[in-house]
Amino acid sequence: MADPASPPRRLLRGFARRLPLLGTLAGLGLGGWLVATNDLASIGDAFGRIGALGLVGIVVVRALIVLLCGLAWARLLAGLGAAVPDGGRVETGAFVILRFVREGVNVLLPVASVGGEVVGGRLLTFWGVAGSFAAASLLADMLIQVATQVGFTVLGAGLLWRLPGEAAATLARWTVEVAAVAVAAVAAFFALQRLGSARGLERRLAGLLRRVLGGPEPGAAAGPSVRDALDAVWGRDRRGPLAQATLLHAAGWLLGAAEIWIVLASIGVEASLTEVLVLESLSQAIKSAAFPVPSGLGVQEGGFVFVGALFGLDAGIAIALSLAKRVPDVVLGLPALLVWQTLEARRAQVLAPPG
């Protein structure tokens, strides 16, 4: 007898597989509409005023941000000998390199904004890390990253609330309400990782490990389960590394505001610290909310136009600002994708013991 739930389940899976493509088309449509409804000449003029030096500056800042995120990821497995079954250890540089790969996949490939995490977890196993610990470190890293972003968004809302005008107050109120929902989602995500009763999460991750990360078959005794690995990562004796990872992610979010300041200063627009922090925090929040849209195509541009209007930013300057922030995506992302393909092609050499 056919399972009555099968057709809806197949429909849902088909929709999930097509979601990145649908998001890409929607983002391209929104981006095209923004360009078509604004003065293309003013956008080009504003972008041209940024200059090569300004673009180099934001590329350097973005590289520093990704570096901080890579260091944060490394802290999550620091000191966990069980993560590498043969008793070895993974150098911090591997996490930094793979963090660049994660970013490159997420911003340049037509996948939802978590595709890079799957690739990063697979590549981490090339260094001998157990698949369960690779998955656990990614889950914890994603949770800390989202939690610190929520904090950054609340900071932006608080600064926005101090600005005069009903529009700023309304947006700040809306942002706080959304942040409250995000806090509840983060708490639920944390509970799923910490509660021993969350077996559904483990079963799905085990399946993912078998298909992508090369994890053991169910029932195999080759290593700890994902739940055991999560317990180790979140252990009470690891408050130091967890706090360090949190601070590094928080610093990365704050440093992102430097990209906006560099671009606006290069164009010739004076912006206060409050303005750049609000612009960065709210635009990142809007982009993250539209995670099914690869790299926030169109959404990021729309976010800058919407939030920038509160500070009197011309739409052409706001779109040019968004386009400038995409330059590091390409400059850093393309080499990262090449590194990914190189690692895939040379897996045997990566796993080969020294000497």
Image (tube, rainbow, N blue to C red):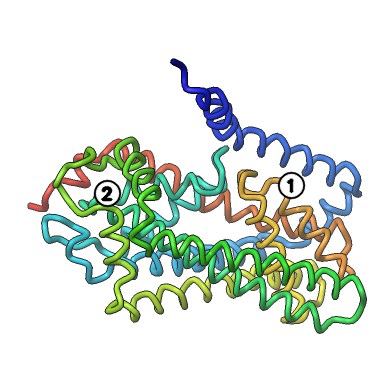
Question: Sequence-wise, which precedes: disc 1 or disc 2?
Answer: 2
Q: SS of the residue at dot 1?
A: loop
Q: Nearer the viewer, mark 1 or mark 2?
A: 2
In the foreground, 173 or 26:
173
Q: Residue at x 67, y 50 (%)?
A: 290
Q: Quadrant of the N terminus?
A: top left
Q: Residue at x 80, y 80 (%)?
A: 161
Residue at (40% x, 50% y) in the render = 201
Category of crowding for the residue at label 1, using alpha-carbon neighbours closer than 10 angstroms: few (below 14), some (14–19), many (at least 20): many
Residue 91 in the image: above or below residue 345:
below
**Which residue is identified by label 2?**
131
* Mark 2 nearby-residue class (10 Å; few <14, some 14–19, many ≥20): many
Front position in the image: 258 or 231: 231
> Real-space Cα distance between discs 1 and 2?
35 Å
Residue 121: x %, y % from top left: 35, 49
Percent from the top left, x then y, of residue 11? 58, 26
Choose top left, top right, bottom left or bottom right for residue 341.
top left
Q: Report the residue at 42% width, 63% height from top.
A: 141
Q: What residue is pinned by disc 1?
A: 298
